[in-house]
Amino acid sequence: MVENNICPIGNTLDVFNRKWIFCIMSNIYNGKTHFNEFKQMNPTISNHVLAQTLKYMEEQGMVTKTVIDEVHNKTEYALTEKGLKTNRILYEITSYFFNELDDTRSEEEKEQLLREYREVYGI
């Protein structure tokens, strides 16, 4: 749970304190909804860490988990209303990456990618 820090940024970061949360949310925005899809999109995450992160996100009210097929252990994840409200945060992180950290693309490529992400995140 969130500690009662004076700083609202610190309080927010306490909730998003796991490395993979924003990547998984971005995956969901991009149409990925299953454990194996998250694993494929983030190949360096271990199965254990992915499972724990999804469970944490569910406990925090950011995603819902729906069992599709109990026999084959198929589940589907979706962002909740609370999770959907991260769209601006995700876009701003993406924008910061392209504008400040990515020196491998031209300005035109960066702007095209940012237009695509604005569409993905509904901004």
Image: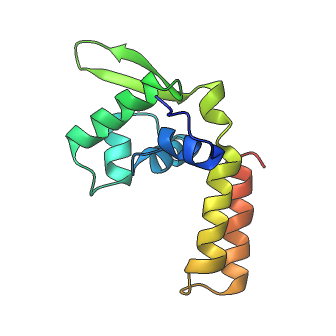
Residue that lies at the very extreme toward the front in this rendered image: 6
Q: Could you tell me residue 51's position as x and y percent?
A: 28, 34
Which residue is at a point 75% across and 45% down the rendered structure image? Answer: 122
Which residue is at a point 22% across and 47% down the rendered structure image? Answer: 46
Residue that lies at the very extreme toward the right in this rendered image: 123
Which residue is at a point 73% across and 74% down the rendered structure image? Answer: 111
Q: Could you tell me residue 83's position as x and y percent?
A: 60, 33
Relative side of 15 to 123, left or right: left
Relative side of 6 to 34, left or right: right
Q: As displayed, is residue 33 above or below residue 59?
A: below
Residue that lies at the very extreme toward the top in this rendered image: 70
Q: Could you tell me residue 102's position as x and y percent?
A: 56, 80
Quarter of image, res 86 = top right
Q: As displayed, is residue 26 above or below residue 56?
A: below
Total marks shown come to 0
Seen from the viewer's position, the closer of residues 31 and 83 is: 83
Q: Could you tell me residue 117's position as x and y percent?
A: 67, 57
Quarter of image, res 34 = top left
Seen from the viewer's position, the closer of residues 52 and 42 is: 52
Quarter of image, res 80 = top right
Which residue is at a point 23% across and 20% down the rendered structure image? Answer: 72
Relative side of 17 to 50, left or right: right
Specify how the rendered protein is coloured: rainbow
